[in-house]
Image (cartoon, rainbow, N blue to C red):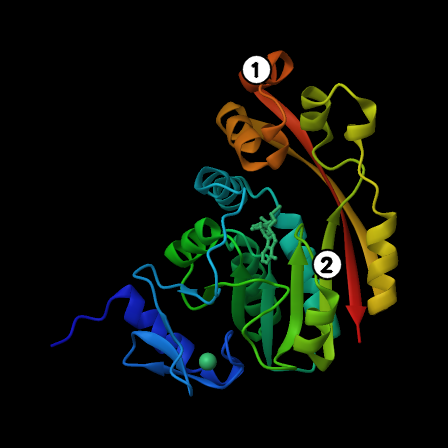
Amino acid sequence: MVKVNKRMKSAEHLSNFESIFKCPICNSSMKVFKLKSLICSNNHTFDFTKQGYINLTTHLVKTKYSKDLFEARRKLIAENGFFKPLSQAIAEIINKHAFKKGTISLIDMGCGEGSHLSNISEIVSSDYNKITTGVGIDLSKEGVLIAAKNYTNKIWAVADLANTPFKDKQFDVILNILSPSNYAEFNRLLKADGLVVKVVPQSGYLKELREVIFDEPVKQSYSNVDTFERFNENFQLVDSSRLCYTVTLDNPAIQTLVQMTPLSWATMEGQVKSFLKANSAQITVDLEILIGKK
Ligand SMILES: C[S@@+](CC[C@H](N)C(=O)[O-])C[C@H]1O[C@@H](n2cnc3c(N)ncnc32)[C@H](O)[C@@H]1O
Ligand SMILES: [Zn+2]
């Protein structure tokens, strides 16, 4: 008897949704072949990895996000509930705007290590009684690998959100959380009545950490004027809401926080060292959720 491994399970799961894919090289339709590869009608072949994700990029991409950063992010989200209020807010938004649908197809563009998509899908299913199908893509192999290792029953792919391997109008909801956007591609993928949910940091986001890292005041705040304008130019803004809360972290979680954010690339000097020694810290999460339709 053939032992079903993780790679085969993922391939089997994806085969239920193979019709949404198009070849990243020639745009033709794709099929799962022998629970081993995803292959197009012109024989361009992409193998499933043993962790269960698939790499659909056509060239090697090295990103600045490391395995350690994604592991830290996962730990803080999964063990410390760092973004729990965000997951709950997004699940509620999805239910409110897509409440008539029994099954909701989600794609997370720039999914990182996959916890947001996993948590949001879980809440939409448990609290709102909806079936979800989930796809997470990210350009970082390190992030997608961690997602595939920890969260099954989702499709995880290394892919560029500016040029995705999916046919037009395949998704009810596009999630785009603290990641870059490509609105032309979002528009192409979104169903006619679909929803884009974009999350951007606001002025208080991780301010306690930024205060110890940066001396120059200019770097201490975020400006999102351009982001808002561009979102408005591309979608009909149906709603927006600011979500601000604090999370109390113990010392191990403070260490994890510093590792999980690109802010720590800037410096690891004096003030950061004393921050790392604190027994606990109150950390602000300050986000804007933009909700758009076509
Ligand atoms: C700050 S991280 C946020 C990750 C995740 N959404 C989260 O909140 O934990 C930004 C992510 O965008 C991804 N990214 C950047 N450019 C991308 C692109 N062109 N296509 C896909 N992902 C991209 C990075 O690899 C990284 O995982
Ligand atoms: Zn092809």
Task: Look at 73% across and 37% down and name the residue there.
Answer: 205
**Circle 1 SS class:** helix
**Cα distance between the residues tagged 2 and 1:** 33 Å
Q: Amino acid at mark 1?
A: Lys
Task: Look at 40% across and 63% down and name the residue there.
Answer: 53
Q: Is residue 195 visible?
A: yes
Task: Look at 38% across and 80% down and name the residue there.
Answer: 39
Whether 225 is drawn above or below 169: the answer is above
**Circle 2 SS class:** strand
**Residue that label 2 marks:** 198
The percent coordinates of residue 191 (x first, y second) are 69, 81
Q: Amino acid at mark 2?
A: Lys
Q: Quadrant of the N terminus?
A: bottom left
| Mark 2 in CB contact with mark 1 (< 8 angstroms) | no
Whether 152 is drawn above or below 145: the answer is below
The percent coordinates of residue 10 (x first, y second) are 36, 70
**Residue that label 1 marks:** 273
